Image: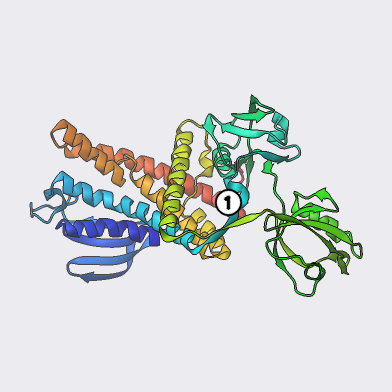
Amino acid sequence: GVLVFVHELGHFVMARLNGVRVLTFSLGFGPKLLATTRHGTEYCISAIPLGGYVKMAGETAEDPRSGAPDEFLSKTKWQRFQVLIMGPLMNLVLAVVLLTGVFYTGAEVPAYESQPPVVGRVVEKSPAEESGIRPGDVILRVADRDVDTWEQLFIAVTPRAGKDIPIVVRRGGEELTLRVVPESQTKYELGEIGVLPEVHPQVRGVTPGDPAALAGLQAGDVILALDREPVTDSQALVKSINGSAGKTLTLTVRRAGTPVDLQVTPVKRGDVGRIGVDLSGYETRLIQPGFFQAIQMSLKRNLELTRAIFDTLRGLFTAETSPKQLMGPLGIAQLSGGAFQLGWSALFSLMAMISLNLGLINLMPIPVLDGGHIAIMALEGVSGRDFSVRVKERMLLAGFVVLMALMVTVIYNDLTRITWVERLMPWR
């Protein structure tokens, strides 16, 4: 709702600035649930929450027109372009603003995400193991795309579930090209090859009075080893502690860059040993940039997401990306609920990503969308004449068919991700 409102507000404000009379400003389509009229414009909330619209006087050739200067088609192509572009542009700006706020307030992020993708562990029976990827390999390229960090690696692999892709690794100074077919993971069918960075668990919190606190363990400590054996798996660490009630263990931690040995004795609670710590499976780093640095980080992140969006769109046309990864309003609602449970930072990050999607998709040259109308105006400008009503109708009909096919696809995908609905689909 917020993203649609911002988008339509862009059209509305620019229309008013260019002297175009606005008849209706609606959130949603179909029957109007609530409506009020002010200064000649009807503001309403409609029944079908799949978007919104701003209806302008004389907007199309089929609309009743008097030739008045406040009608949309009475304006110059430059003025109409401003009105059309402002909706998507507002979504792009909102994405930058939201992520600027997220970064400026500070956030904890996995430290490994910005590190080179050096394989620390290969999951047993995973696509990576079957293709011959080994611990210590440095992943250089995925599907002919350079990957410099773990985050870039995940972005490159995620949309390619079930597709045979080349992965270039460096091993002992030699570059090898291996063929890997990422597995489909989760209900969104995201690609996963089964490689993990070399990470160490980090202490997030310590319970006062428990063995960890008495031993001197502190929040922020990174656990490097247990009884001199390297620790890279938090679950394995917990299992070892659970089975060592009453036994003194030596934990080697990194604190302020310096290794420290601590002696801790788990106490038996129930059937397992516990020391009283809250663990993260990986080391995190705190981002606390200044305002202008936060803007720079937001712009960089939005550029990375833009590239990922276009990679996914290209993958849809080349059959490299499954259409099953697309999601519609129901999927967005589910993700929003999950993000809100994680906190405002996660929710605003998701809003920024969806706003960026909305802005970019609306700029695509598909008739019915803003980008389609802009493309038609551009073609008219190149040809030196306006197209006939019949030609425009055919263009808009083609765009409408594409849009409806996309809508049916995403809603079907959303329904298949709801367990009880999927049970009603015998073909699945």
| Residue identified by numbered label 1 | 417
Please indicate, yes or no, whether residue 309 appears anywhere in the rendered image.
yes
Relative side of 44 to 187, left or right: left
Relative side of 105 to 179, left or right: left
Residue drawn at point x = 18 percent, y = 32 percent? 382
Closer to the camera, 241 or 179?
A: 241
In the image, what residue type sits under mark 1? Arg
Residue that protrudes farthest toward the right in the picture: 246
Colouring scheme, one of rainbow, by chain, secondary structure, one colour? rainbow
Residue that protrudes farthest toward the bottom in the picture: 209
Q: Which of the 4 image quarters holds residue 389?
A: top left
Closer to the camera, 126 or 241?
A: 241
Relative side of 316 to 196, left or right: left
Height in image: 332 above or below 105?
A: above
Closer to the camera, 313 or 121?
A: 121
Q: Quadrant of the N terminus?
A: bottom left
Please indicate, yes or no, whether residue 194 appears anywhere in the rendered image.
no
Residue 52 position in % (x across, y down)? 33, 57
Residue 206 position in % (x across, y down)? 73, 68
Residue drawn at point x = 32 percent, y = 38 percent? 398
Residue drawn at point x = 26 percent, y = 55 percent? 11
Closer to the camera, 197 or 19?
A: 197
Q: Quadrant of the C terminus?
A: top right
Residue that protrudes farthest toward the front in the picture: 258
Relative side of 13 to 411, left or right: left
Residue 185 position in % (x across, y down)? 63, 44
Kind of element beneath mark 1: loop
Residue 366 position in % (x across, y down)? 32, 40
- Pointer 1: residues within 10 angstroms few (<14), some, or many (20+)? some
